[in-house]
Structure formats: C-alpha cells, structure tokens
Amino acid sequence: MTTFTPSPTPIFVLTLFLTLISFSDRRVNSATFTLVNNCGDTIWPGVLSNSGSPLLEPTGFSLPAGTSSSLSAPTGWSGRIWARTDCFSDGSGRLTCATGDCGSGSLECNGAAASPPTTLAEFTLSSAGGNDFYDVSLVDGYNLPVVVANSGGVGGCEITGCAVDLNPLCPLELRVGEGEACRSACEAFGQPEYCCSGEFGSPDACRPTVYSEMFKSACPRAYSYAYDDATSTFTCAGGDYSITFCPETTQSQKSTRASPSTPSEATGVVVAAEDSWLASLAMGDTVANSVRRKASIFAVSVTFPAILSVLLL
C-alpha cells in the first residue's frame, strides 16, 4: 500500500522562502551606507574599495545640498568614502573638482583614490570577530566636516568624525588656494617625521607634531597622524552607517572659504592670512610662540562645545 505524504502548506513554504531570502540578504549585504549632504552646495561623493575587497557601486555620484543617497556594502567590504567639492565639466565633458578629485575625469572614480587634502571616512566590515572597524581620517588633510554614526549595531558603535570646519583655522603654510582645504604636514613638507616614513616609520619613532595636534585638538576622535589608532578607530558589530557631510551647518562652503581671514561664524576665532605660528613653533622660536599656540588651541577647544559634545559622549 502506498503511503500518502501531504505536501507542505503554501503558508509554510512561503515562510521558509522569505526566511531564506532574509538570511541570504544579510550574508550578501553587510551594511548600508547613507550619505547625507548637509552642506550649502552640491558635493560629489567618491568611493574606493581597498585592494581585494568587493566592488561597491557607484564609485562616484552627485549629491545635491539637503539630500541623501544610500549604498549597499557587501560582507567583508573595506574602503573609503569622501566628498569632492566645486566640481565642473569642461568643454570636453571632463569633470574636475577643486578638492577630493580622483582624477578619473568623470562622475565615477572607477578605482581611483582621492587627491589630498581630503577628509576620509574609512571602513572595514565584518572583520575580526565579526566586528566592523571604522574611522574618520585627517591623515591626508581636510576638506569638509564629516561625522559617521551607526544604527542597529551592537558593541561600542560610537559616533566619530570631525564636525568642525577647520578651513578657517588652517595655518598659512598648510592652506590650499583661498582656503578650500587644509593640507597635512606630510603633504606640505614631505619630511619623514611628518609622514611617519623612513626612520620614523613605526609607532615608537613617529610621534604627534604641532600640526597633527592642531587637528587632534579640534577633532579629538579623528585620525590626526598615521599612528593615531588608540583614540581614532572604533568598532561595532553589524548595523548600518550614516556619513554626514557638514553635520552642523547648511552654510555654503564657498561662503565660508570666501573670507578666510575673518572670524568664523561657528567659532568666533580670527585666523589672519599671515599667521604662521605653527611653522614658528616647529622651528623652535621663542617661548612666547608656545604660549600663543596653547592659547589658540584652547580657544578652538572651548568655542566648539555644542559641536564636539556629541563626539565626546
């Protein structure tokens, strides 16, 4: 006699199917990045996957002021995300950007890195112990404020980044053009002690400089030099990430850069174009310069309490 085995009910089959899809989706897509443009102008985000990492597309796009866009990142993805500014197309259609240009000549960066100085948001997803590692780096200089926050993850999952507009505070010797960006000391001077290279290529030999300390004082959770790991790398297990450009202001970056020698509306600190106190201090000039530097850094730290409070929780 043949035994009849009833087939699974349609509801059971549908539930199993949806469960498998959900599980598969979590395996394939490790996180969603939501890029938010809170600046007063359009920005052009760029995306670069590290060598051997799965491709994350698109690798570049336009993001108008006040809008956001999301990217799905596969499990194990690692790379960096940044913003290009003041981009325009010439007569031949080649795209060129004032800061963060990746040199591709097009909307997408297609595997090309950002030209410094550029603020970088860096990620390694589903790494050791299943944790994500993330940071905001000023090692390659600075062009825009950037803050990274996690939602839905477990563990530390702390907010990090640089919410301060450093361009009005940038010393003359690091300033780019009319103040649209601030170079790192490594890029500006090319010396091993600033680049953590050669005989300075180790954590013990390469120490903070007066320039990296300026970045660190204003943005204590961002990378200020190559071996600034202890206070600058954060972990989280799972969840999604928001990357907010210009988190505290919708003011046009162009208007901020137009008068670099005037007081910043956000800080009230005056930075004169001829002010090169960091270079004087680096060369060992007078105790008075040291006092001046400390006073200036203190002024920076006490004039951003509202902005930095969220980063210091």
Image: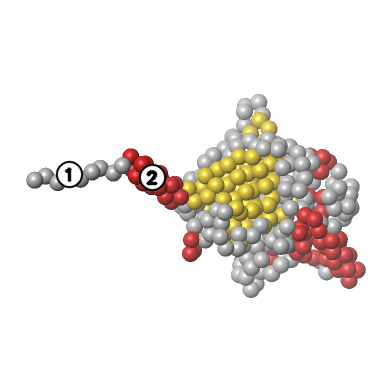
- From the viewer's side, name the closer residue of 148 and 216: 148
SS for dot 1: loop
Judge left or right: residue 83 versus residue 73. right
Name the kind of residue labelled 1 in the image.
Phe
Determine crowd level at label 1: few under 14, some 14-19, many 20+ residues with C-alpha closer than 10 A: few
- From the viewer's side, name the closer residue of 70 and 179: 70
Label 1 belongs to which residue? 4
Q: Give above or below for 202 relative to 180.
A: below
- From the viewer's side, name the closer residue of 158 and 20: 20
- From the viewer's side, name the closer residue of 267 and 213: 267
Residue drawn 59% across the image and 34% down it: 106
Q: Earlier in the sequence, mark 1 or mark 2?
A: 1
Quarter that holds the C terminus: bottom right
Compute the Cα span from label 1 to label 2: 24 Å
Label 2 belongs to which residue? 15
Residue drawn 81% across the image and 58% down it: 305
Q: Nearer the viewer, mark 1 or mark 2?
A: 1
Q: Give above or below for 84 relative to 160.
A: above
Residue drawn 20% across the image and 45% down it: 5
Place of residue 293 in the rendered image (x, y in percent of width and height, measured from the top left) = 85, 64
